[in-house]
Image: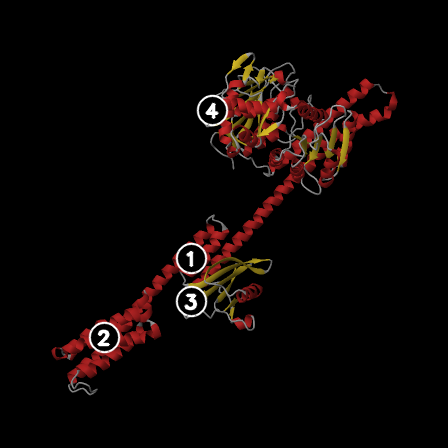
């Protein structure tokens, strides 16, 4: 099996593709200290071949590489690799983020990032592929509880009625808690591929959804806007 | 217009002759009814007409031809130049004199009228061109307009406007027929190198200044035949380019047209100079901005970046110095402090870069429609978890959407919130509110700290300014409020601080509704 699904008896194997020596060294010692197996690659070509030979459980990919762009690497990886890809980028360049997520990266972190944040995201992704998404029955965050099987939502114990579309949006965001979901991904998933650029429709439904689930006082807490990119569901901390 | 051009072919003589023949043929059948003096009267309008249409010389020719026709056909004996009666002699001589006078007079009036019309066209053309030059249309459009006018108004077959790019001719715009390629290029380059016209004959009117000195084409480049005129485009100080105009085959440019071409070329030179100076001004502005950015960075980089770096270095080397001896709890607390210093270092770098980008206008806002509450949601999510209960949001739900750069606005508001949390007592609440007032949306952050003294209410938004009350709080970068100020500015709004009641400061940021920034 080439998709890199981890087997429970061995430590998760992480491939780090980053051209900066300092970052590679730091990540190796941090990850090894937490009993991950670590492979390092300093450029895109080496990274792609390391991905084939080591079949990592998760790939950490820097977007600025000397030989090819990180986006190209992500694209080539996604042709066969099904494990999580976490993208690192220097500044918050929206276009790169959107492109990386649309190409199939699962998450991105902006450098400098804290070790705690990186490890938390990695654990979440590894858990997700180990557990399998289908088995998640309900998701909660703060006072919000979403029952994916029954398609019901409660806020602070009170049932809230959502339309089908609103529920689909919320469910997709909640399944990807703490990860940015691009507008295009939402539109494609909820409405279908032919609607992928209809962001105005999405904004209208999002506004209704927020009205129903967000606390009074006018400031959203569960679904945050990621400007130019999409939306992010805030999971329990 | 077409038959008028026909009338002037070969100096208008064929036209004059034809007119005489037609009038004679028309009168001949009535010869028996006409006295020579009456016939003479009937010739005169024809002479005047020829003068109007074909000019003085043609009218004199018509007068002579008419004189001969009268003598031969209307003065007895017919078909002989001899004249029988002395009265008829007088008639003939009077005819010749009157006809020549009428023709000459009419011809001169015609010439003056034509000159006036020509001046008017010239004035109109130059007026159009010069108003184009000061209007703010793109240079491509203006250049195209100049060559277009030369073809359509001056009747050229082809016109090309060259600019001078690193000493060589560069086609800026062309109009009309197909060019001759290499020859045009060679001659245009020659004109630019020598600042002399090619193919321009001496012009009678000396009122046009500056008038370029001209040479023949083969003097410029041997073996090259110029099929048109090449004019250098010269201003007082510089040679800006060249203008080429080719007449229609068989219709060389008249002296008037050439004077107009020279006048047009002077305007085109002014246009090119303006374009070049505009480009240079833009580059100067860019350079100045880069300079300003550099100054900002250098003046602050040592303090803002080195302070946290020094702190981290001190802590880490201190731990290394102590070696094995130090206990785990101390290592942990030192590392925790070092990590906080590094966080400050990161914040400082981010603030410095963002402020420089804002100040030099290289971080332009990308305006999109958002709800104020969406932006505040992101602001709320950035407040450190320990501080979150201190911040109370009171935002009405019916606020209209705003057009903002989300990232910039969230940044500005976060800075105001951070500032309030930093400068007010740790157990006091910070309130964030919003409302519409007039044509603006106002968002404010209110704390219960010491407030800002009136003397400092403006200065707190200057970069690296630390107020008198902030001495106790060393951890700001000194740029937070300056960044908020710049962001408000780029959005066409503003930010200010006022006194809150009963105590504290209220920082307000305004954004014009529906209005857009520069």
Color scheme of the displayed model: secondary structure
Give how far apart the Cα atoms at labels 3 and 4 are.
68 Å
Query: Helix, strand or loop at disc 4?
Result: strand
Residue where numbered disc 3 is placed: B248
Can residue B15 be seen from the camera position used here? yes
Mark 1 or 3 closer to N-term? Answer: 1
- Residue at the image position 50 percent from the left and 17 percent from the top: A161
Residue where numbered disc 4 is placed: B437
Quadrant of the image containing the C terminus of chain A: top right
Tell which subunit mark 2 falls on. B
Residue where numbered disc 1 is placed: B126
**Residue A10 place in picture, x, y as percent:** 77, 25
The numbered dot on residue B22 is 2
Mark 3 or 4 closer to N-term? Answer: 3
Q: Which residue is at the front of the view, B155 or A133?
A: A133
Does the CB distance between marks 3 and 4 fall below 8 Å?
no
Q: Residues within 10 Å of mark 3 (few under 14, many from 20)?
A: some
Could you confirm whether marks 3 and 4 are on the same chain? yes
Q: Residues within 10 Å of mark 4 (few under 14, many from 20)?
A: few
User: With A136 as the anchor, is B50 left or right in this view?
Assistant: left
- Residue at the image position 62 percent from the left and 20 percent from the top: A136
Mark 2 or 4 closer to N-term? Answer: 2
């Amino acid at each position: 099996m080439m998709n890199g699904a981890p087997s429970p008896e061995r430590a998760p194997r992480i491939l780090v593709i980053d051209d900066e020596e300092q970052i590679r060294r730091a990540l190796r010692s941090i990850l090894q200290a937490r009993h991950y197996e670590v492979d390092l690659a300093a450029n895109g070509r080496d990274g792609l071949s390391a991905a084939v030979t080591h079949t990592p459980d998760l790939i950490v990919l820097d977007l600025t590489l000397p030989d090819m762009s990180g986006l190209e690497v992500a694209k080539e990886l996604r042709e066969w690799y099904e494990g999580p890809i976490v993208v690192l980028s220097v500044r918050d360049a929206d276009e790169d983020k959107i492109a990386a997520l649309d190409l199939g990266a699962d998450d991105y972190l902006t450098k400098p990032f804290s070790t705690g944040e990186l490890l938390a995201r990695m654990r979440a992704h590894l858990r997700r592929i180990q557990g399998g998404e289908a088995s998640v029955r309900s998701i909660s965050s703060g006072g919000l509880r979403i029952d994916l099987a029954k398609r019901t939502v409660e806020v602070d114990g009170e049932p809230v009625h959502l339309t089908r579309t609103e529920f689909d949006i919320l469910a997709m965001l909640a399944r990807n808690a703490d990860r940015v979901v691009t507008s295009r991904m939402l539109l494609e998933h909820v409405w279908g591929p032919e609607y992928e650029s209809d962001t105005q429709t999405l904004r209208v439904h999002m506004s209704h959804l927020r009205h129903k689930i967000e606390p009074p006082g006018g400031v959203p807490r569960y679904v945050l806007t990621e400007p130019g990119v999409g939306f992010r569901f805030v999971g329990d901390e | 217009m077409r038959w008028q051009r026909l009338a002037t072919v070969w100096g208008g003589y064929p036209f004059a002759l034809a007119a005489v023949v037609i009038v004679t043929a028309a009168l001949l059948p009535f010869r028996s009814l006409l006295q020579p003096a009456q016939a003479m009267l009937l010739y005169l309008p024809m002479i005047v007409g020829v003068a109007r249409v074909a000019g003085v010389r043609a009218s004199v020719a018509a007068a002579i031809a008419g004189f001969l026709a009268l003598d031969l056909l209307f003065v007895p004996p017919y078909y002989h130049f001899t004249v029988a009666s002395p009265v008829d002699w007088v008639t003939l001589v009077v005819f010749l004199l009157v006809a020549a006078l009428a023709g000459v007079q009419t011809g001169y009036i015609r010439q003056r009228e034509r000159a006036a019309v020509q001046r008017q066209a010239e004035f109109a053309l130059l007026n159009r061109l010069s108003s184009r030059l000061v209007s703010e249309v793109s240079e491509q459009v203006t250049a195209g307009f100049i060559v277009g006018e030369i073809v359509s108004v001056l009747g050229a077959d082809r016109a090309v406007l060259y600019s001078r790019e690193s000493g060589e001719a560069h086609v800026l715009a062309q109009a009309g027929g197909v060019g001759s390629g290499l020859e045009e290029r060679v001659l245009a380059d020659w004109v630019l190198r020598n600042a002399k016209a090619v193919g321009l004959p001496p012009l009678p009117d000396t009122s046009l200044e500056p008038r370029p000195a001209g040479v023949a084409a083969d003097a410029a480049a041997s073996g090259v035949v110029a099929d048109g005129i090449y004019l250098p485009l010269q201003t007082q100080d510089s040679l800006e380019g060249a203008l080429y105009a080719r007449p229609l085959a068989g219709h060389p440019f008249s002296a008037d047209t050439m004077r107009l071409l020279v006048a047009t070329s002077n305007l085109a030179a002014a246009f090119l100079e303006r374009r070049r100076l505009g480009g240079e001004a833009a580059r100067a502005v860019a350079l100045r901005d880069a300079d300003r950015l550099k100054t900002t960075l250098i003046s602050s980089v040592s303090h803002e970046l080195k302070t946290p770096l020094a702190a981290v270095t001190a802590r880490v080397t201190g731990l290394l110095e102590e070696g094995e001896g130090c206990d785990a709890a101390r290592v942990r607390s030192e590392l925790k402090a070092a990590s906080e210093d590094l966080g400050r270092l990161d914040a400082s770098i981010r603030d410095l870069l963002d402020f420089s980008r804002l100040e030099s206008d290289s971080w332009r806002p990308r305006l999109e429609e958002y709800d104020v509450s969406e932006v505040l949601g992101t602001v709320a999510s950035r407040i450190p978890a320990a501080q979150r209960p201190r911040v109370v949001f009171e935002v009405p739900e019916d606020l209209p959407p705003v057009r903002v750069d989300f990232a910039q606005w969230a940044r500005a508001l976060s800075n105001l919130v951070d500032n309030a949390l930093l400068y007010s007592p740790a157990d006091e609440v910070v309130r964030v509110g919003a409302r519409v007032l007039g044509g603006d949306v106002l968002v404010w952050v209110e704390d219960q700290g010491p407030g800002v003294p009136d003397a400092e209410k403006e200065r707190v938004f200057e970069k690296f300014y630390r107020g008198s009350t902030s001495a106790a709080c060393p951890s700001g970068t000194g740029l937070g409020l300056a960044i908020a100020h710049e962001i408000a500015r780029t959005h066409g709004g503003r930010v200010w601080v006022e006194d809150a009641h009963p105590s504290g400061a209220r920082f307000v940021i305004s954004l014009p509704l529906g209005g857009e920034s520069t």
